[in-house]
Image: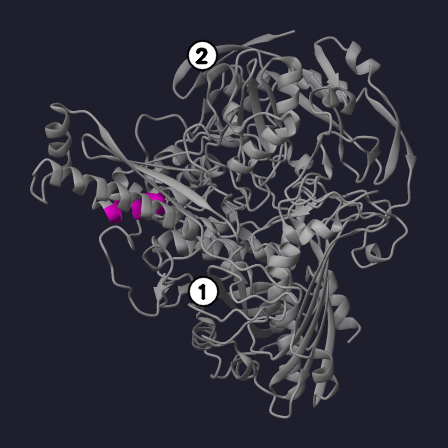
Amino acid sequence: MRTEVHFRLNGQAVSAQVAPHESLVEMLQEQFGLYGARESCGQGMCGCCTVLLDGVAVPGCLTLAVLINKKEIVTVEGGQTLDPVQEAFIEAGAFQCGFCTPGFVLMTRQLLDEYPDPDEDQIRHYLSGNLCRCAAYPEIIEAVKLAARKRKA
Amino acid sequence: MKRASQPTETPQVGRSIPRLESWLKVTGRAEYVHNLRLPGMLYGKIFRSSISHGRIKRIDTAAARALAGVHSVVTAEEIKSIVPDPYYGPAFLDQPVLAVDKVRYVGEPVAVVLASDPHVAEEAVHLISAEYEELPAVYDEVEAMTSKAIVHDVLKPAGTYPDLKHLQGKKNTNLALDFRLRRGNPETALKSAHRVFEHRFRTQQVMHTPLEPLVTVVESTEDSLTIHTASQSPSFVRIEIARLLGWPENRIRVRVPFLGGGFGAKLYIKLEALVSVLALLTKKPVKISLTMEEQFFTITKHATTFRIKSGLDREGRIVARECEVWWNGGAYADIGPRITQKSGFTAPGPYDIEHVAIDSYALYTNLPPAGALRGFGVPQLVWAYESHTDMIARALGIDPVEFRRKNILREGRPQATGTKMKDAAIETVLDRLEVLLDWKKPFDRGGGTLKRGRGLAVGFKACISNTTSLAAVSVNADGSCTVYCSSVDMGQGSDTAMAQIAAEVLNLPAESVRVVHSDTDVTPYDMATLGSRSLFHMGNAVKLAAEDAAGQLRALKDELKLPADAPVPDIFRKKYGMRAGSVTGTASFNPSYTPPDANGLTENATPFWMVGGTGVEIEVDTETGRVRVARLINVADVGTPINPKIVETQLSGGSIMQLGFTLFEKLQFDAAGQLRNASLAEYRIPGFLDLPGEIINEAVSAEQRTGPFGAKGVGETATFGLSPAVANAIHDAVGVRLTELPMNPESVYMKMQNK
């Protein structure tokens, strides 16, 4: 039994047929070929599956696809060019294996929307729900500071 | 990153360029096996053992098979129709593709359900039931030495390693290797020593926890297999699957894109044998992606017990050391017996000791298998010998730095095996730690309920040998360069390092070099991406292959009577009359090695040494036992860095990972061998709030003369010293000695109460 949902995905109006148990991550991967949001822990503990739902970061592996009707979804694949956050992550070398990086990029955008000039403590707390097993945390802090400067420039 | 002095910078080597694949990673477009979906693909979900040791009496799969949407259910019976003797492993042929007759740990794969919808497969798994005749089990590594519970009826060494051959056919034992080293006369020396100290240390079982869980996709044709897998060892996968199937290697193609972390979890055979057989059975593409929970039942890091005893003379010199190490290998040996030996021979630490005895035991138990995890056993050893070293220094009333300096293993002096130290900046690392810690200056010891302390530790590691890397480097008609190698970039930055090395030789910008990912149909053999060996072994192979290509270009210029500075496109245009052709340089690199004799001694134990030291300043909350690292200092001998920024990230990342193993990570088993915390909700790994206040990373000025442009591996170096440095600092702060990891608030607090 599938339900049709209509929503905006990275700025485009789209629709999909989704099963009641289907997660947002599964739908993005299977129906839209978007793999940037990826399931890792499956419990909402790691942040690898982060997507923006109406501008708010949510774990895509715990969000049911049927609930996104008429909502706005943004994934890391949105945007034609690199934004200041992505540029900063590259320049600061803020990743190793890259598996968690999309989640960090999206969470950092939300952080900088809320706190355009965050101090180190704010960065640590705001991003504490995202895990990086390679532990590129010091570089991520640098990247966030750099992105804040880039956004202001 | 701070450096004690600047290396000679050449144009490409020594540049901190961003990783070549940066754009792919920040836009979510990097290729992982995780992303792969093939037409008609089936998903496999695994039914696992619920008991730790027992004979399988019955597996009831009828209800699972009857569920709508289920393609098939597979047990060992079906596996045997493709592989009659379905056992694999790098050291022992002990691990079945699916459990045959017996299960040996909770979580062992027993059956697989296949369906085109993974949710259907998972639902069907819950409809399977199994009956077992339970057998006595053993969990503790020391008890396993003498336990009546025997994990494997007969030992079956794989035949690859000569030092395991004597175990062929052995029964009634859990011992998968007893590595023994004797140098000098330790017994006598200990008897006549002025002071003798003996301590016992333990480390806990932990898990690698790569955020990309293990995943394999296999597609088959009549006579070939393509295995897409998140593996650190594609060449090994090809050889081992070829052996299992009795096929020539050229019918098996192993492709590896990027890995979402590895840390040793993705070595040898993990899902590859199972998924290959499933693809052959069903004649359809098959994918198995483990959940995070399932990873905990797949591969872990050895828990250990280490008894260490040292004899000292009147001047505070260590004259004799006795080391006995028990490695808890779990139910299948994986690479444990190699860890037991290759790291075992460094158990006395980086000290100049005349009389040494080492006994290092690989043991089977009824726990999830243990293998290599970022350090190949060395962090467990350093934990013990650097805690022990500190305890002796404090007991003797000698400053811990002075005590180490008095005993340190200097360049040219023989290590326990008899191999003389070369290009190992142990003393420099100690010196720099002392400086960066301001060791000689007064230290703020805190007050009230926050006590401050500081500690340090220095460890070293041999690189596993004998191993081989091959590489090919092509220069195309337009002068662009392609590197073909089977090193796997799992986040450590090997693609970028290899590009920098090839670019240096060929005088190109590193950013313009393409590195082809592991594909055994295309990229030549490599032993594996493990043990910090790639930069040294593959780096040398890439350098030699690039030099070979450069030599071919020079020869073409001579042949065509072109000037030495002729641009590359001109060479090909003149040779072929148009933009056509290419040259490919090839090379293999296999450093020399001498196996140990009957006493564990050899003049040539390793192609290079890694040296890592850690200093910490910590705060202990005396009301809760919580330890906070205020300042963390990593000092390492990494030779001459190829990419200083990536080196720094490796040092920093390795130390933060080890901080989790030091302060809180632990697999918790109940009395029946059931793992109770197999999820990230219950098994915490370091996050932002666990970060030390300040982290300093320093590569000392050093050169590995046999390395590519003076470089050597760095992936594991910062894991060596952290745990004992923290234990030493806790003792410094509150006067209690922790001898077991992790040092979580509860254990620190209880120790303080029982002081």
Q: Callout 2: residue from which chain?
A: A
Work out whether residue B706 or residue A43 is closer to the camera in this orientation and state it.
B706
Query: Is residue B478 visible to us here?
Result: yes
Say which residue appears at 72% left-offset and 83% top-offset.
B190
Say which residue appears at 36% left-offset and 63% top-offset.
B705
Image marks 2 and 1: residues in contact by CB distance under 8 Å: no
Q: Mark 1 points at which residue?
A: B636
Is residue B577 found left or right of B72 in the rendered image?
Answer: left
Query: Which percent across, then down, holds residue B572?
Result: 15, 30
Residue B243 sits in quarter: top right
Is residue A148 found left or right of B236 in the rendered image?
Answer: left
Work out whether residue B263 or residue A10 is closer to the camera in this orientation and state it.
B263
> Label 2 sits on what residue type?
Val
The residue sitting at the bottom extreme is: B314
Q: Do the residues indicated by labels 2 and 1 lie within the same chain of the protein?
A: no
Q: Callout 1: residue from which chain?
A: B
> Label 1 sits on what residue type?
Ala
Say which residue appears at 75% left-offset and 50% top-offset.
B167
Say which residue appears at 61% left-offset and 71% top-offset.
B386
Span colored in magenta: B496-505
Around disc 2, counting alpha carbons within 10 Å, would you say few (fewer than 14), some (14 to 19), or many (20 or more)?
A: few
Work out whether residue B505 or residue A44 is closer to the camera in this orientation and state it.
B505
Element at label 1: strand
Is B580 part of what is drawn in magenta?
no
Q: Is residue A17 above or below residue B300?
A: above
Query: Which percent across, then down, holds residue B151?
Result: 82, 45
Name the disc covering residue A14, or none. 2
Query: Which percent across, then down, holds residue B631?
Result: 50, 66
Residue B522 sits in quarter: top left
Element at label 2: strand
Query: Which percent across, then down, holds residue B578?
Result: 13, 23
